[in-house]
């Protein structure tokens, strides 16, 4: 409905304005008796300062105030897949190159105009403020948006609505919706009820944005069951969002109706929607006094496991608290990190292996061969003749132990000769009696300052080599050779293969690829020409929620650590049943 003007007569707006928290209000003498606008009794010169500005509801908690038990002193292994690695790398590059370039591009920032009143205004004062504004056409909506951003006093917003109603005799849907947002975010229950009554009288249906706001607003009140009717209204148009369901579930749990909450949860999952972490947390927080739903709460953890979802720190603390509150003092929770060997530091039990089962490996191999190696876009990166030539090359040779992305490894350092770097790494691996395949491009054989012919000749003596055309992309070749060689074969590259993972047809196969990748990818972590070659530790355990009869191990996202989709958490919660 966007900019649709609602035909609210002045008496329709009246309920929005009478619930003022200020005691210094009187009836404006120039307003007709059937509609009374509340204005300040003492008209003072208005201020444009934001008084007592509040932080938004979604502010993250101070990470310094964490539980002491959440701190794990053990050193963590370095890995390109560890949570926070990408962010640390970006910060390092930013420090290395400085911020001057960004500043030149963005230019100096213009100071934002702050003209939000700190107290309710009269209609005359609002008119003056509007006349002085640069864009008076959208003044009211813009002002309400600023109030929302600043979490302004609700009475200031009411005085703006009163001014608009007096000036035009109507309030636009757009303006009313922003006022509703302010009411919901500020937990102003009576104002939310008033807006709801007005909209119900004026409209048979609302847009989904309004329904969503009302669901959130009602969920925290004694009228929470209204959320169920609003959900049904949304269903007539679209599928409700996980957040819509989440607020309704939270309302049911807050008011002791766990049966309705579980019905809504199961309905949401059946529709293929992924619940929010706040919804899971609400279940664990509300059921601490009733432990007859242990199997249902366990199903929440299994859902996270099956979809490779990691709980955040707030949720994992609620999970820990619920288990430790089980009658009989059965469970004990500890914060930990796994050993490189794959054992839990706390209980010493073995975590699930990162290695794929035979069925998983065959399933992944088939999907990668069909969707990545022989996919629709593969010949944008090579030619049919070159691909068939490579397949024949691989099939004629015994399985490889390590497949090396030659160019990627050669560019590990900007210092020294590229062929020397590649030769050192190949020699290091060849000393371990490993069968090696080096993938490169034909320009590497022509001889140049970067590519010494003698070095390339020695590399070809130590490893099998295949050189593609210079315009070809070697990643499909690398994946083909690695998967064709068997589950033992690893590949060496810093390329995280995100584009190729995206080509896979479904989320379960992409998760399987990611698991295989973490267990098979070698990455150079440290290289000093002529002196040192080190690889990142390949984990022996899978970073996924896992359980046995008497324990749960739950990897979780730490507050303040930004994790990219190709990274996994570093910290774990160990839950073990006391003996």
Image: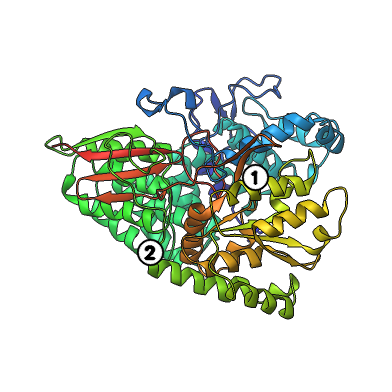
Q: In which quarter of the image is the N terminus?
A: bottom right
Camera sees residue 254:
no
Q: Residue at x 51, y 63 (%)?
A: 510
- Circle 2 residue: 357
Cα distance between the residues tagged 1 and 2: 69 Å
Mark 1 closeness class: few <14, some 14–19, many ≥20 residues within 10 Å: many
First in residue order: circle 1 vs circle 2: 1
Q: Is residue 477 above or below residue 566?
A: below
What mark, if any, has residue 18 been given in the picture?
A: none
Q: Quadrant of the C terminus?
A: top left
Quadrant assignment, res 31: top right
Which residue is found at the position 38% from the left and 38% from the top? 338
Q: In this view, does 482 lie above or below 291?
A: below
Instruction: Describe the element under mark 1 as helix, strand or loop.
Output: helix
The image position of residue 371, as x and y in percent, is 58, 73
Q: Name the residue under label 1.
A: 165
């Amino acid at each position: 409905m966007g900019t649709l003007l609602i035909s609210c007569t002045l008496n329709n707006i009246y309920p929005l304005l009478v619930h003022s928290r200020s005691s210094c209000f009187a009836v404006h003498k120039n307003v007709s008796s059937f509609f009374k606008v509340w204005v300040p009794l003492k008209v003072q010169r208005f201020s444009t300062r934001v008084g007592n500005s509040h932080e938004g509801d979604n502010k993250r908690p101070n990470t310094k105030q964490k539980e002491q038990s959440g701190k794990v002193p053990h050193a963590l292994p370095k890995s390109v897949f560890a949570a926070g690695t990408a962010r640390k790398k970006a910060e390092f590059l930013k420090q290395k190159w400085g911020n001057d370039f960004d500043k030149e591009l963005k230019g100096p920032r213009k100071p934002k105009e702050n003209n939000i009143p700190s107290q309710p205004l009269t209609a005359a004062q609002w008119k003056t403020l509007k006349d002085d504004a640069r864009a008076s056409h959208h003044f009211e909506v813009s002002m309400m948006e600023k109030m929302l951003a600043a979490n302004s006093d609700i009475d200031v917003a009411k005085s703006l609505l009163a001014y608009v109603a007096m000036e035009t005799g109507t309030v636009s849907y757009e303006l009313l919706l922003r006022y509703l947002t302010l009411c919901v975010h500020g937990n102003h229950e009576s104002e939310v009820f008033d807006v709801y009554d007005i909209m119900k009288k004026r409209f048979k249906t609302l847009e989904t944005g309004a329904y969503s706001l009302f669901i959130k607003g009602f969920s925290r009140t004694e009228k929470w069951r209204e959320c169920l009717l609003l959900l049904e209204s949304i269903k007539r148009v679209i599928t409700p969002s996980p957040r819509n369901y989440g607020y309704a579930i939270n309302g049911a749990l807050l008011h002791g109706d766990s049966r309705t909450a579980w019905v809504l949860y199961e309905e949401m999952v059946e529709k293929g929607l992924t619940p929010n972490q706040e919804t899971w947390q609400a279940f664990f927080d509300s059921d601490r006094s009733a432990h007859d739903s242990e199997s249902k709460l366990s199903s929440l953890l299994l859902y996270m496991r099956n979809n490779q979802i990691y709980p955040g720190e707030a949720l994992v603390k609620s999970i820990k608290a619920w288990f430790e509150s089980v009658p009989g003092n059965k469970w004990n929770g500890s914060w930990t990190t796994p050993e490189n060997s794959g054992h839990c530091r706390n209980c010493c039990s073995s975590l699930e292996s990162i290695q794929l089962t035979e069925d998983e490996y065959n399933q992944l191999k088939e999907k990668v061969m069909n969707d990545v190696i022989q996919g629709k876009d593969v010949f944008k990166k090579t030619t049919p003749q070159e691909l068939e030539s490579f397949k024949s090359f691989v099939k004629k040779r015994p399985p490889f132990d390590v497949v090396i992305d030659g160019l990627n490894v050669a560019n590990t350092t900007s210092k020294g000769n590229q062929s020397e770097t590649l030769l050192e790494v190949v020699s290091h691996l060849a000393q371990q009696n490993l069968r090696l395949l080096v993938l490169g491009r034909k320009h590497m054989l022509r001889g140049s300052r970067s590519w010494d012919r003698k070095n390339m000749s020695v590399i070809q003596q130590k490893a099998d080599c295949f050189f593609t055309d210079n315009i070809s992309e070697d990643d499909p070749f690398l994946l083909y050779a690695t998967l064709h060689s068997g589950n033992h074969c690893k590949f060496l590259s810093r390329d995280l293969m995100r584009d190729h993972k995206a080509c896979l047809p479904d989320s379960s196969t992409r998760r399987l690829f990611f698991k295989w990748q973490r267990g098979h990818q070698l990455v150079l972590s440290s290289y000093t020409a002529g002196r040192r070659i080190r690889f990142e530790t390949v984990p022996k355990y899978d970073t996924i929620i896992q359980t046995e009869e008497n324990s749960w191990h739950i990897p979780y996202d730490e507050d303040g650590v930004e994790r990219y989709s190709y990274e996994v958490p570093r910290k774990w919660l160990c839950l073990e049943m006391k003996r």
